Amino acid sequence: MRRAQSRATIRDAHMEASGGGGTLLNILWSYLAARLGREEGATMVEYGLMVALIAIVALLAVAAIGTNLFGLFSDVANELE
């Protein structure tokens, strides 16, 4: 349903811009300009990449700290014995 609305909106915008008619190439050009002009999708991709990078850094930090903490607690346990 949404895709049909999107196509209708693009077609209507093209018809207004071209004066009511146009060649297939003009319609295609208008469609691509409308699709590439929006930045909502690119913004979501950027947020997704940032979240993935943060998750990787967090996992690496936990892995490094976890190993160090295990060694520290082992040393403390050995001293207490």
Image (cartoon, helix red, strand yellow):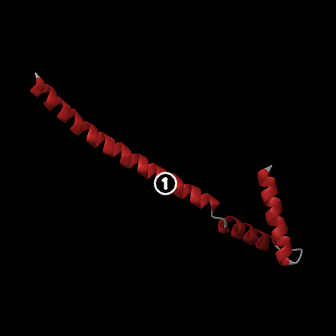
Q: Can residue 22 be seen in this view?
A: no
Q: Position of residue 46 (x, y in %)?
A: 52, 58
Q: Where is residue 9 in the image (x, y as percent from the top left)?
A: 81, 63
State which quadrant residue 5 falls in: bottom right
Determine the residue located farthest toward the top in the rendered image.
81
Q: In this view, does 42 lie above or below 54?
A: below
Q: Which residue is drawn at 27% across and 42% down?
A: 64
Determine crowd level at label 1: few under 14, some 14-19, many 20+ residues with C-alpha closer than 10 A: few
At mark 1, the secondary structure is helix
Which amino acid type is marked by label 1? Answer: Leu
State which quadrant residue 44 falls in: bottom right
Determine the residue located farthest toward the front in the rendered image.
80
Q: Which of 70 and 60 is in front in this view?
A: 70
In screen coordinates, is 71 left or right of 19? left
In screen coordinates, is 51 left or right of 75? right
In screen coordinates, is 63 left or right of 71? right
Q: Residue at x 86, y 72 (%)?
A: 15
Q: Which residue is drawn at 65% across and 67% down?
A: 36
In screen coordinates, is 39 left or right of 26? left
Q: In this view, does 28 lie above or below 72?
A: below
Which residue is labeled 1 in the image? 49
Q: Nearer the viewer, residue 36 or 58?
A: 58
Q: Can residue 57 be seen in this view?
A: yes
Q: Where is residue 61 in the image (x, y as percent from the top left)?
A: 32, 45
Q: Position of residue 7 (x, y in %)?
A: 79, 59
| Image quadrant occupied by the C terminus | top left
Q: Residue at x 49, y 54 (%)?
A: 49
Q: In this view, does 44 lie above or below 11?
A: above
